[in-house]
Image (tube, rainbow, N blue to C red):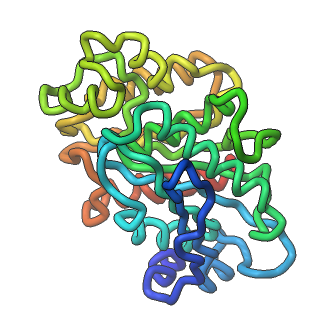
Amino acid sequence: MLAILIGLLTQNDVDANVVYSKVGDVELKMDIYQPTSSAEASPLGTKRGGSTPRKAIVMMHGGAWVSGSKEVMTAKAKYFAGAGFVVANISYRLGPKAKWPAMLDDAQTAVRYLRTNAKKLNIDPDRIGATGESAGGHLASFLGTRETRDPKPAEFSSVSSRVQAVLNFFGPCDMTGDFPPIMDGIYPMVLGKKKADAAEECKDASPLLFFTNKTAPMFIYQGLIDPLVNPEISRTAEAKLKELGIPVEARYLEGIGHEVKMSDASAALAVDDGITFLKKHLN
């Protein structure tokens, strides 16, 4: 924890707004954070610089697939860099202009970009994880379980989109279940249809329905008073992964809503437990 906190207070080595893809006239960008110097001394970290390829994390913001930006994840990106990861904090296309599965295609392209440029970035292409909050956690879960969706992607077509471990911050793994009425307007903006008419689209947007015995190990962070994602969705995902024999850990947090509340001791500990989980399964 000390090395991570020091990392937050130091100047990060970051390549901002790196274009990883272009779809039509839309440039998709990522901020690439290198491990901070404090990570060199941390038993959780990896030495910055040098010749040993490093662990990497693809990080995705929330916003119900219709809002948000990579900038809202800056503090978290620094936190993970302080723990010794190369962090690719990405943007992706949003509704209503873009419809599912554009968001997934972008996240998968970001993974393939990192693998294609692994030598230049000094990352290990076989030690890439994913994390994200809410919609970003949903996409991270997909990166751990679904290979490149587009059968003929325009970019890096021969490279795998799968990651080796996932830290899911309250991302819904099942879009077929019940959500609060406030979410009703999201379905047309993201899936192109009202939920009542989008049964197949909801299935296609549900990571849980793609879980297999090849799914990546997953850590789930879930608040028990989350007003948007019912904790039972996360419990069902955890149970399914256990049934398949996939390593999974979950933290269900009393008094925590749809948030990563680092001022709460139990929430902060859960985040650090998630980081430890990622490191274990990316070694």
Observer-nearest of 172 and 198: 198
Q: Is residue 67 above or below residue 195?
A: below
Q: Residue furthest left?
A: 181
Q: Is residue 135 visible?
A: yes
Is residue 204 toward the left or the right of residue 41 in the image? left
Q: Position of residue 238 (x, y in %)?
A: 47, 27
Q: Depth check: 9 or 16 in front?
A: 16
- Residue at 71% across / 79% down in the picture? 48
Left or right, 223 with reference to 6: left
Q: Residue furthest right?
A: 51
The spot of residue 99 in percent (x, y) is: 40, 33
**Residue 153 higher or lower than 151, as above or below:** below
Report the residue at 59% width, 38% height from top. 143
Q: Quadrant of residue 188?
A: top left
Tell me if I can see residue 249 in this picture: no
Image-quadrant location for residue 122: bottom right
Residue situated in front as seen by the camera: 7 or 161? 161
Q: At 40% from the left edge and 71% from the top edge, which residue is drawn?
A: 75
Total number of numbered discs in the rendering:
0
Q: Nearer the viewer, residue 148 or 76?
A: 148
- Left or right of 77 on screen, residue 156: right
Point out residue 71 in the picture as x, y percentages from the top left corner: 38, 67
Residue located 76% across and 46% down the image: 156
Q: Up-down: is 188 above or below 168?
A: above
